[in-house]
Image: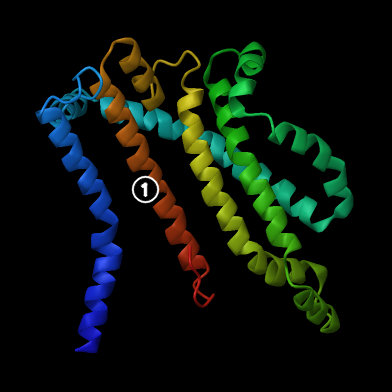
Amino acid sequence: MQLRWLDMKKTYEYYILPVVLPLLLVFLWIYLTERELIAPYLIPSPKTVIHTIVQFIEDGTLLQDSWASVKRMLQGFSLAVFFGLLFGVLMGLFARVDQFFAGILNAIRVIPPLAWIPIIILWFGIGETSKVIIIFKSAFFPILLNTIQGIEGVPKGFLEVSKLMGVSKRRTLFNVIFPAALPSIFVGLRLGLGAAWMAVVAAELIASDSGLGYRITQGRELSQPDAMIIGMIMIGIIGVAMDAVVKFIQQRILSWQAGIKS
């Protein structure tokens, strides 16, 4: 009886409770639009949005825009992962490297991505390169900072034991430091992924002719709130799905850690 109660509680907490608020918001949306308490040009009805979604699916617009945004994000995020981990490991392991790069990187970090758009356009034009650079900048620093924090946060006792046992520096790096730093590194990857995905919209404001950010901008210019809402919904769905993939990988890799909570 107690096990059945625990199963019901788990089902409620993990499957029912998370969808309560979204359903309430949908019902509120339906109520407000059906009663015409909000003008259609401000918030269209769910029927209008569904009709537009079907139209976008049939003519391929939704798939093309989604893939254009995802491709740009993956390009910028991949570069951010490579350089973020590289500099994070070097700056976390070597104090002189940290002192050499810390000043300039901190100065760049505090400048918002949108502030870089004019000069990036000046340097790289309005092509795909500019968009990838903006996405890269947004994702780079969460990965960098969390990698540094993870490596610097390795318990000193682990390193002392490895030294006493005569473990080589290379084996200590891969068998002690990296495993201990992985939780923090994964936090950086998830934060960087979220930042990269949010930066897609800003990046696609740069004279883009495709992508979800472009679709939202075009919807604003043409007074099509249904297209804007569809773009926002797709950004949310794809963002949650990508975060879930990284979270799944994190849980599999860090399954050896008892009680880990992603």
Residue 67 occupies quadrant: top left
Label 1 packing within 10 angstroms: few (<14), some (14-19), many (20+): few
Residue 115 point in image, percent of width and height: 63, 22
Residue 248 occupies quadrant: bottom left
Left or right placement of residue 59 versus residue 147 in this view: left
Residue 183 point in image, percent of width and height: 59, 63
Decide which of 166, 52 is in the foreground and name it: 52
Residue 31 occupies quadrant: top left
Left or right placement of residue 17 versus residue 107 in this view: left
Q: Is residue 77 above or below residue 230?
A: below
User: Quadrant where the N terminus lies?
Assistant: bottom left
Residue visible at 66% across and 63% down?
181
Circle count: 1
Residue 12 point in image, percent of width and height: 24, 67
Residue 184 point in image, percent of width and height: 62, 59
Q: Residue furthest front?
A: 37
Residue visible at 59% across and 35% down?
138
Q: Is residue 139 above or below residue 181?
A: above
Q: Is residue 23 above or below residue 28?
A: below
Residue visible at 16% across and 24% down?
55
The residue labelled by disc 1 is 241
Left or right placement of residue 69 versus residue 183 in this view: left
The type of residue carrying mark 1 is Ala
Decide which of 229, 247 is in the foreground and name it: 229
Left or right placement of residue 164 versus residue 153 in this view: right
**SS at circle 1:** helix
Q: Residue furthest bottom?
A: 1
**Is residue 74 at least partly visible in the picture?**
no
**Is residue 123 at least partly visible in the picture?**
yes
Q: Residue furthest right?
A: 96
